[in-house]
Image (spheres, rainbow, N blue to C red):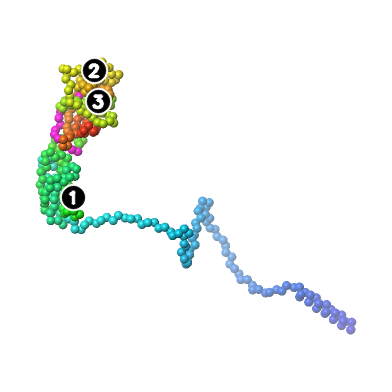
Amino acid sequence: MKRHFWTTWIGIAVLSLAISACGATARQVIPTARPTATQTLTPTASSTPGIGATPTLTPRSVASGPSPTPLFGSTSTAPAVLTTVTRPPNPNAPRIEFFTTNVQQVEPGGVVTLFWSVRGARNAIIYRVDSSGARGNLWNVPPDGNLPITISRRDRGQATFLLSAGDGDLETTQSLSVPLSCPDPWFFQPPPDACPAGPAQATTIIEEPFERGRMLYIQSRNRVYVLFNDTHSPAWLSFENKFNPAVDKESEESFVPPPNLFQPVRVLGFVWRGNDVVRNRLGLGSAAETQYDGFIQVVKNDDKEDLYLNSADKSILELLPGGDIWQIITAGSS
């Protein structure tokens, strides 16, 4: 019995020691809350920029705070564009309601009637204006009315008038031009703007082409005209015909021109042989002279004139005053 007691006591002691040893080395477990279920997101397909796509930076917005200060001083501001202010018309200036005539055109020597109406003025003036714009003859007229004016028989081109109302800064003007019909028709078409001084004149013309120009003899004027094709001045010259067939020889017999070239003879040859400038600038004739029935017509400009004549090839030649210019204004048939 006593032996059984000690055996039982020793077993209990050994068991207690074993339990103590296990408690010294075991990890202390701290209970935690069980995690809640979280929804798992399933990824979806999205478009991906291509290789050449340019990334775009989204600026970060600033909710508040001071404005940024430039590193290199204040930011320059483009200057304002200055606009030109148009001065409005003076409300006190007279106003022209109309200034007109009763005809589309008038013949030199005919009568044209002018009609006008002006507001804001007690009277007005009508001027005749020349080709340079200078004011000439004048008529003092009431602010409303009509005025018949006789056109001179010598006038050509157009008749221009100027209506004026007010003075100085308050002057108001309006011009009116009336075309003048030509009393004499041109012998060619299309005609120049100006009217001829008279009817076309029939005449015998002798013409010869040269290497660098041409020569023409107009029998009705008894003059030789030399037209140059070079760039030198003058562009053309004219000479009185002094050839006398009873005394002067037709040509220089000792001179033999190269093949396909010609020495001018008689009237044209007399001028060509006797003038070094003409001979050197023209050269030799490229064909023999031609005689034909032609026409001439002129436009008078004070003491000067524009000469028009037809060439052997039916073209129309224009010779302007002073020898400055000659030109073909209507092409012919070559």
Q: Where is residue 31, by image quadrant?
A: bottom right
Residue ID for mark 3: 278
Name the amino acid, label 3: Val
Residue ID for mark 2: 252
Ranked by sequence position, the earlier of labels 2 and 3 is 2
Q: Where is residue 33, by image quadrant?
A: bottom right
Residue ID for mark 1: 174
Name the amino acid, label 2: Glu
**Who is closer to the viewer here, 199 or 267?**
267
Q: Position of residue 258 (x, y in %)?
A: 30, 19
Name the amino acid, label 1: Gln
Please check the rendered image and state whether residue 110 is part of the magenta-colored stretch, yes or no: no
Crowd around label 3: few <14 · some 14–19 · many ≥20 (10 Å): some
What is the C-alpha distance between the residues marked 2 and 3? 16 Å
User: Farthest residue in the top direction?
Assistant: 254
Ranked by sequence position, the earlier of labels 3 and 1 is 1
Q: Which span of residues is magenta-colored?
A: 193-206
Crowd around label 1: few <14 · some 14–19 · many ≥20 (10 Å): some
One can see residue 53 in this view: yes
Crowd around label 2: few <14 · some 14–19 · many ≥20 (10 Å): few
Q: Is residue 66 above or below residue 296?
A: below
Please check the rendered image and state whether residue 200 is part of the magenta-colored stretch, yes or no: yes
What is the number of the mark on residue 152?
A: none
